[in-house]
Image: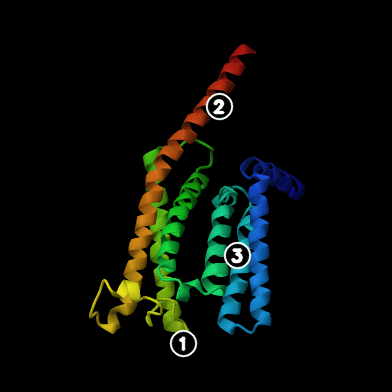
Amino acid sequence: MIKQKLLGEYRIFRRQVTWVEYALWWAGRLALFYILAAAVRGDRGELLVMQLKWEFGLSFAFPVLHLLPRKIFLARISYRVQDVIILMLVITAVFGQYKGYYSTVEWYDAYLHIIGSFAFVLVGYELTMALQRREQPIAPVVAAMCGFGFSFFCAVGWEIFEFICDTVIVSSNAQNWSFVNSSQLLRFFPGIDPRRLALLDTMTDLIAGTAGSLLGGALLLPYVAHQNKKAEARASGLRAGKNLR
């Protein structure tokens, strides 16, 4: 039973993922392990080490879901979602946290929200496909709406998570309430009350996330339409082959 499950998942994995993508997964994991070890050796602080440990663990979490029975929709999500997960972990952990781009590169956080929301539209689409028990086409408009909705949900959820972190963890500055390296943004809001700085950070993040979600949803329309045409062509070919027999 277990052997059949593993063989079946391996076949699905080979169909969905190229070896280049698989190599990039491991490159990302090695990068995460390297910065985790470097942070521990360099005594970079307990909070950073804790974050890097969680992110390194998350790099392995998604493939484990495929060990679940396929009647559970989480086990039917495309392996290619791991591409997005590795990308976001590397951008946030390696560059944002370990290299310190969050505090040294202004607009890095905004760019990250745009890129992340754009990428998570694809995750929302794949999640929608996994909820179907059969591999059947989905209307491009429906796909775009589902992808956008999931991506926007993640953008809002992340801001809630930042608020919780700043409330629970004393040293947390997730909402950038201290507004480190934000002089360019503050030029757009001269004389703003310092008590509104955390709100300003949250709202600019949400605006950036919305922009990424809208762009991703718009580009998902032609992508799904193309995928549907390919699926129809394959189905027509199979029907033609059966008729010839």
State the mark number for residue 234. 2
Who comes first in sequence, dot 2 or dot 3? 3
Name the residue type under label 3: Leu
Estimate the spatial distance between the alpha carbons at disc 2 and disc 3, rounded to whole Å. 36 Å
Who comes first in sequence, dot 1 or dot 2? 1
For label 2, the crowd category at 10 Å Cα-Cα, with few meaning under 14, some 14 to 19 and many 20 or more, is: few
Q: Can residue 67 be seen in this snapshot?
A: no
Q: Nearer the viewer, residue 45 or 188?
A: 188
Q: Nearer the viewer, residue 107 or 153?
A: 107
Residue 164: image quadrant is: bottom left
The percent coordinates of residue 240 (x first, y second) are 57, 17
Q: Residue at x 65, y 74 (%)?
A: 36
Q: Can residue 75 be seen in this snapshot?
A: yes
Residue on which disc 3 sits:
58
Estimate the spatial distance between the alpha carbons at disc 1 and disc 2, rounded to whole Å. 57 Å
Residue 53: image quadrant is: bottom right
